[in-house]
Structure formats: C-alpha cells, structure tokens
Image: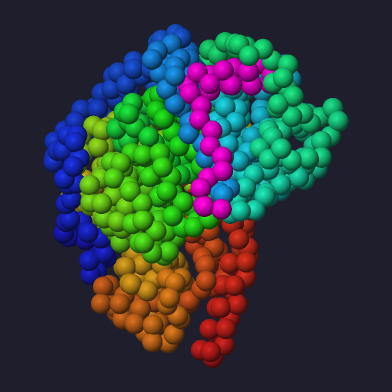
Amino acid sequence: MSSEGIMGEPLPFEERIVPASHSGKVVDPKSYFELHRAAVEDLEGFWGRVAEELEWFRKWDRVLVPGEHPNVYRWFVGGEINVSHLCLDRHVRTWRRNKVAIIWEGEPVDERGQPRERRVLTYFDLWRLVNRIAHALRRLGVSRGERVAIYMPMVPELPAVMLACARLGAVFTVVFSGFTGENLAMRMRDLGARYLITADGFYRRGRVIELKKIADEAIRLYDGIRKVVVVSRLGADVPMTDGRDVFLDDLLAEVPVNAYVEPERMTCDEPLYVLYTSGTTGKPKGIIHDHHGYSVLLHATMKWVFDIRDEDVYFCTADIGWVTGHSYVVFGPLMEGATIVMYEGTPDYPAPDRWWSIVERYGVTILYTTPTAVRMLIRFGDEHVKRHDLSTLRLIHSVGEPINPSAWRWLYEVVGGGRCPVGSTWWQTETGGILISHAPGLALVPLKPGTNGPPLPGIEVDVVDEQGRSLPAGSKGFLVIKRPWPGMLAPPTGMWGDPEGYNRVYWSRFPGVYYTGDYAIRDEDGYIWVAGRADEVLKVAGHRIGTYELESALVAHPSVAESAVVGVPDEVKGEAPVAFVVLKSGHQPSGELKAELMRWIRERYGPIMVPREVVFVRALPKTRSGKIMRRLLRAVLMNAPLGDVTTLEDEATVEEIKTAYEELRRQIR
Ligand code: ATP
Ligand code: MG
C-alpha cells in the first residue's frame, strides 16, 4: 500500500479475519460500501426509515432542519417522543413485561469470593420504580426544563433516576462518582443545577467511598442547589441538612406503589441531558443530547453494531458517568428491551478475574469494554481468563482509545476463543453514539486487528489534509464528518450555553464539516484507523506519525504493558519522540531493556523514529475514564504548566514522572 510517511509496517492493513462461528451476514467491503452510499445519498429518507421503528407520540414533519445557531441541527422536527417511554412503557405492554432488565452485582464478596449482593429488576419493576421516582421528584418541584445533577455510583437507582428525569423532561447531568467535590461543583455551576441526586456511598476496591460527604463539599462551593435527594446504598448514617436533604426511601414511602407519571412529549429543541467530555485534551465541554436524533442513533447502533437480540445478556463495563454508560449501559440496551448486567466495582476486586466470573455467572453474550481495561487485564496474565467458561460470548467491542493490534488479538483469541467478532467502535461524547464500526448485526466485513472498520450507513466521514482536501487511501490526516447525523450535539446550542464555543471547537478548523480532533488513516478497503488525537501527531524529519503507532509497536514487545509517546522539539529532526513505558509484572527496568526497545522501534520504523529517550514509569497519567493524558507528559518534558488537571485520575503519576524524568536528565548530564 502506498503511504506517505509510514515506514516499516505499522498497522495490519492487509489482514482479513472472519470468525468461523459468526452467524450473520458477511460481505466484502465493496458491497458494504454500496449499501453505505445508498444511505448517504438519501440521508433524510434513510434516517426517517430507521426512526419509523421507534414509537413516537407524534410523528415528525421534517427529518432534518437547520437550528437557530450555525451548525446546530434539529432532527425529526415536529416529532414528539420520550426516551423513558421508549425504554420502559413500550416493553411493559408486551411479553417483555416480566423480562429481566437489569442484573446488578455489588462489589463486596464473601469468604469464598462470591458476590454478597445481587439485585434483579424486570422491566415492570424498573417501570414501577422510575414512575415512583418521577412522582417523588415532581413533588419536590422538578418539572420540564429543570436542571438536575446526578452524582451516583453504579447501582440500579442510577439508571432509574436518569429515566425519571427524562420522563419529566428535566435536563440532567451525570457526574462520575470518582470525581472530587470541585469537579462536581464546576459541572453543577455550568449547568445551573438546582437539584442534586446522590448516594450515601458505595464500595470500590473493597473500600467504602463516602459520596455524600464529597457532595456536601461541592454544595459548599456552589450555592445553587435547593434540594438534595440521597439514595441509601450503604444504609450509612450520613450528615443531612434539614430542609434541603432527603432520603429517596423517605420520599418513596409517600408515593403510591402504582404511581404513574405520564412521560412528557418532548420536542426536538429540548435537551435530554448535558454531559461533560473526558477532558483528555483540555477543559471538559458540556455536550447536549436530545430525545430525538439520539434515540434513533442508539436504536440503529444497538441493532447494527451489537446485533442485539432478546436472548442476549449484555454487559457494558463502562461507568454510567461516561457517555458510553449513558448510551450503551442505559438508553441503548433498554430501548431494545435487552437484559443488561451492571457491576458496581473494579475489575480486579477481589481478584483480576472479576469480569470473567461475571461473564460465566450470568452467561454474558455481548461484552463492551475499553482498551485501558484490556491492557490492565493482559498484565495480570491469561490464567485469570482461562479459569472461567466464557463460551457464551458471541460478540466483543471496545471503545475509548485506539486498541493496539496486540491487545485486539488478546481479546479475540484469549477472551473470545477465536469465535467472536471483536471491534473497536469509534465515537465521542459529542457524537452521542457509535459512528465508525464493524456492524455484525447488519453485514460484517472482515475484521482487521486494531481497525475501527467502515463508517456506519448514513455516516459520511473523510480523512483530509491541512487544507481540508480529501486524502487518498493510506495517507494520514484529520478525521472529519461531512454530513449531520442523528445523535449529534443537539439544540438549542450544541454546547451548553456556548454556541460560539461549539462553532469554534468543531466547525472552524474546516468550514462546513465537523472536525473530530482525531487523526486517522483510511485503508484501501475504506476502513478507518483512528491513530489518536490530531494534536498528538509527531512530525519527525518531515514524516508524520501518530504517537499511537509507536506506542502500539512498544506494547507489542513482550515486556511492555503500556506506553505513551510524546514529541519534544529537536534541532535536527524538528521533533523527536520520547517514550514512557510501563513494564509487565515480572520485568525490571534496565539499560539493556532500554537499548532493546530502541532497537525494536528501529527495526519497525527505521532510525528516524527511534525515541530520544525511553523512560520507565510505574503508571501513566490518565483521565478518570481511563485515557492516557499525553499533554501532561509533554508539559513535564517541556517544563510547561500542566493546564486543566481536574479529570486526572491520580496526581501522583505526574509527580512520579517528573521525578523519573529529572533523574534521567541528571544521568545524561
Ligand atoms: P476531551 O474532548 O475533553 O479532550 P475526550 O475526547 O477523551 O475528552 P470522549 O468524548 O470521552 O472525551 O472521547 C472521545 C475520543 O476518544 C475520540 O475523539 C477518540 O480520540 C477516542 N476514541 C474513542 N473511541 C475510539 C476508538 N474506538 N478508537 C480510537 N479512538 C477512540
Ligand atoms: Mg474529545
């Protein structure tokens, strides 16, 4: 394949894998793209037909109309719908009424390592609970358009509260329960929240996290909260402020068991929720999603990407605090009437086989997880996987970062037993749902380790150069989206309260198209390979290379668990790579290993790409959603300010890296 700036063989463009036992349709990329083109050419007709499959209170008049602000689009104008109705009411009228909606497992285990707590909710149970919570919230004054912050752990009440807010038409923002009070306050302030729903606490890696105390700190920093509703997860005695704080249980005690709250008939201009991005590249952005286009995209992707069926047991390991949890733990699967598994705690508690034991215990058929988790689990060794019967799995996807081909192979072979399609679904908080992915439920094209696959039908993407010109296959460039899609940042302003920011961030780099901020390659089959963030591309002696490509090469070395590469200015080459490396357990840093890793890169990418330094560290700085924050590494190397660190998971990692790097510099001097 012709390729500008690619030396060696970075990514397996030519590999083609079709899992033997995939029962759906398998097609070659050419015929897939025929189907794809037909959808893009009749965009409104195509999405209109998908939307027909949902239940609308009132059908739309127009599929797609420009909104009030530039580049804000209104989808299914004139239509009235409510996602809470789609996820619940629709099912309780059918045989799914008694189908299991949620299997929940708490983190604590007994002496034999067995989970102490399990809760099972049918669709009818969940519908009852959501109606009663909506009833209670309405009594407290929550109504259509009201702003509610939700700061809760992974318990069934979290999806129930989200669905109750949706039912009432209140705009909610879920704040990840691992965030500090300051993080919570910042998001509540930006949204103008007047209600906060939280919990007394929860279990994480065997410890009790006192969530209510952190919530109280946030309320001290932001004084806009009128009422605080507290879910009792631990049954703990927590400080309650008179007149402001109330336990959900006490509220529900006053609500009739059969309370019914009619779902509001939402219009396309009313937000469902606001969610703040992960903050990997800077300050988090408040992204708006609607009931309309968002539901249509989730319905489509649950069918195409997850091939969801009634007999499935679906386990998405994401925390609901992230967009993956919103779209693919809560709204997407419940809309399809699926049975979901929800787990409270960490994958390595009490041992690194917790997820595999969950897959075995409930017969999970579909697994959706992240590369960070996969790399961590690889580090612990295969024996934890092999101890469990994972034969029920039939489909695996990952999301959040590029998946290194070596991590992909591990998922495919060790976890999926070579049977299941394994994909890497590309999307963003902003896109609402998956846009680039294999679609085993529609027509599977052959898999390639590490690729995202082709864009989904109705999604027109391109890879362009600095001037916005479309690039040929094999060239690396910027990933853009050329046509609006349902599920995109929604009215009224795309970004909450900031229509100018919305246009600046997403629509000004290349006028008329949506800029993703990601760097990608399209191969000759039309598959997209997202190679990391556009601002994380190195230009070494005139050659462009995604930091991710060098990282993938390093991770493919038997001693390396994780790696992050950043560029530093270099007088000769313009920019030179510096590699940070975390070793697998059982391997020690040494001069020899460093030399070997440099040789390893030289063999694969030639002498130009050999890192100027290889720095061994214990951990990499990551966001709380598990993404590597390369900008912090660069800041350390450049001795520059760190910038926004509110979403950093563990501040100690940055300090440690500073020390490691200074030590190294002393040695060099
Ligand atoms: P911020 O925008 O605040 O810097 P973020 O971009 O990390 O944070 P998210 O919306 O959670 O916030 O992440 C979306 C980004 O994650 C994508 O733009 C892309 O860089 C990366 N990503 C997600 N899925 C994949 C995937 N399957 N392959 C490659 N990259 C992915
Ligand atoms: Mg982003």
The percent coordinates of residue 391 (x first, y second) are 29, 45
| 489 and 365: which is toward the camera | 365
* Vertical position of residue 410 compared to residue 255: above or below: below
In which quarter of the view is residue 233 placed?
A: top right
- Determine the residue positioned at 37% across, 40% down: 364
The percent coordinates of residue 353 (x first, y second) are 44, 55
Query: Does residue 504 appear left or right of residue 20 in this picture?
Result: right
Q: Which residues are magenta?
A: 111-137
Q: From where the camera sits, is residue 339 visible?
A: yes
Residue 113 in magenta stretch: yes
Query: Does residue 417 appear left or right of residue 78 in this picture?
Result: left
| 329 and 28: which is toward the camera | 329
* Vertical position of residue 593 compared to residue 161: above or below: below
| 492 and 152: which is toward the camera | 152
In which quarter of the view is residue 476 placed?
A: bottom left
Question: Which quarter shows the N terminus?
Answer: bottom left
The percent coordinates of residue 655 (x first, y second) are 62, 70
Question: Which quarter shows the C terminus?
Answer: bottom right
Residue at the extreme top of the image, as rendered: 58
| 96 and 446: which is toward the camera | 96
- Determine the residue positioned at 44% across, 19% down: 98
Residue 61 in magenta stretch: no
The percent coordinates of residue 502 (x first, y second) are 52, 38
* Vertical position of residue 378 compared to residue 598: above or below: above
